[in-house]
Amino acid sequence: MVTLNELKSKQYDMIYSLGYNCFPGIYMKKYFLRKQAGVIDWCISISLSHVNQLLKNRCKDLFVYEHLTYISSFGDGSTLRLRDKVYQIDSAHDFPSSINTENNWLSYNEVKEKYERRTERFLTSMETSSCILFIRMGGTYEEAKELEHILKGMVKNDFYILLLTNSEKELLSAANWDLPYTCVLHAPIFSMDVLRDDKVWEELLSGLVIK
């Protein structure tokens, strides 16, 4: 078990969001903790088990054309929401509705190239960084344990995980999951009031140090 204070006592070469939505990436940027885009920063990835599968496969074939299906428009309707049916990960911001339709994704080649670049940078940092922090919203004990196991095989040096597990217990209280690389905190992660609460993110991210 790792505490939040212990995470804040370390220095990180990279800090990456592992979903489940855009809020970690948004607030990481606000606190100057985001050197570069991760692979799924701006995606919707409800299932940690599917994120684990993505990582286990070294992000291979994410958003290949044959795996994509149209779900809906997103947010204010300015973009399309397309789902990778294999990884159950949704693109929410990549396909502007001004030039893409439900059946015609004119932005596809550009989007696919962007994710390939992000994947290459991400995998390179796994090899070259001395210490990496991963931030994830949502997941069970079993999924978090599997995530540690997968990252141990991917990351050459040190890594830690900050995981918010969906819970109505005291906000940001610690969950003793007895995982050696993971700090687990309780939070109602599907509450928009909590997700948009600057004070919550300040408590989480203020004091984290990126080199």
Image: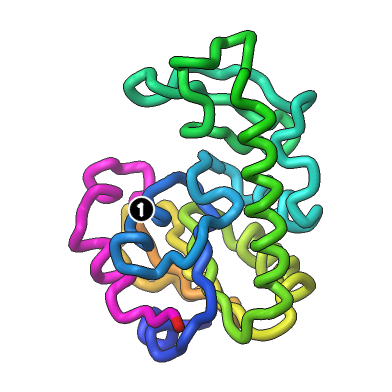
Residues in magenta?
188-210
Looking at numbered disc 1 in the image, what kind of residue is underneath it?
Answer: Ile
User: Could you tell me which secondary element the residue under label 1 belongs to?
Assistant: helix
The residue most toward the bottom is 9
Q: Is residue 3 visible?
A: no
Image quadrant containing the C terminus: bottom left
Count of labels shown? 1
Picture coordinates of residue 189, whole percent (x, y): 37, 49
Picture coordinates of residue 152, whole percent (x, y): 73, 75
Q: Is residue 172 above or below residue 193?
A: below
Picture coordinates of residue 130, whole percent (x, y): 62, 86
Q: Is residue 178 magenta?
A: no
Q: Which residue is mark 1?
A: 26
Depth check, front residue: 69 or 124: 124
Quadrant in the rendering for residue 154: bottom right
| Colour mapping used in the image | rainbow
Q: Residue at x 45, y 23 (%)?
A: 79
Q: Is residue 190 magenta?
A: yes
Picture coordinates of residue 30, whole percent (x, y): 29, 61
Depth check, front residue: 53 or 168: 53
